Amino acid sequence: MSFFIENWILIAVAFTAGAMLVWPAVAAGGRAGTLNAAQAVQRMNHDKAVVVDVCEPGEFAAGHVKGAKNLPLGELEAKLPGVVKNKAMPIVMVCASGARANRAVAIARKLGYADAQSLSGGMGAWRAANLPVEKD
């Protein structure tokens, strides 16, 4: 017991270092399967991933990833099987900030699309990376 009392600072440092090592895994727990903009482009170009924008039609018209298909989050469960028939096809979910895209990934995986991922940061991250945006 005297070891712990005499070395409390070292124990606190060790605990803090361990927590800092584990934190990225804990923080990403709700966002598992996210891609940054460069990874999303790689998935689109090399793996022929389908880009599904889950924004509302007005947001989609204001600017979206070139070639993206618009399926608002509320309609995703009903319409995704008709738009992406091959459940093995990689899917990149996109929205304005990334929050709806994360929920869309959960819905897609529930439907059997195991290779669904979201664009971390959404269209904001896409624009920040100076990637092409299409407007309707």
Image (cartoon, rainbow, N blue to C red):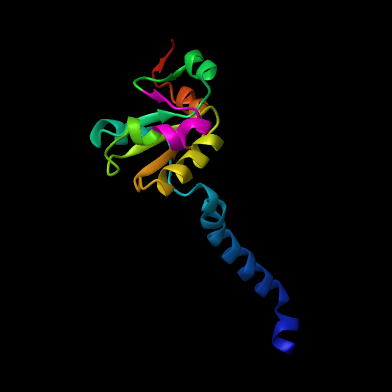
Which quadrant holds the C terminus? top left
| Residue placed most toward the observer, 41 or 51 | 51
Q: Residue furthest top?
A: 136
Could you say where residue 99 lies in the image, as x and y percent from the top left? 56, 37
Quadrant of the drawing holding the N terminus: bottom right
Nearest the viewer among 136 and 78 is 78
Total numbered badges shown on the rendered structure:
0
- Report the side of 49 relative to 20 (left or right): left
Is residue 81 on the magenta stretch? no
Q: Quadrant of residue 49?
A: top left
Q: Is residue 84 left or right of residue 78?
A: left
Extent of the magenta region: 68-79
Residue lying at 75% horizontally and 82% vertically, measured from the top left = 5
- Expressed as whole percent of the image width and height from the top left, the position of residue 13 reads 65, 67
In x, y percent, where is residue 135? 44, 11
Q: Tell me if residue 10 comes above or below residue 59 in the rendering.
A: below
Closer-to-camera residue (98/1): 98
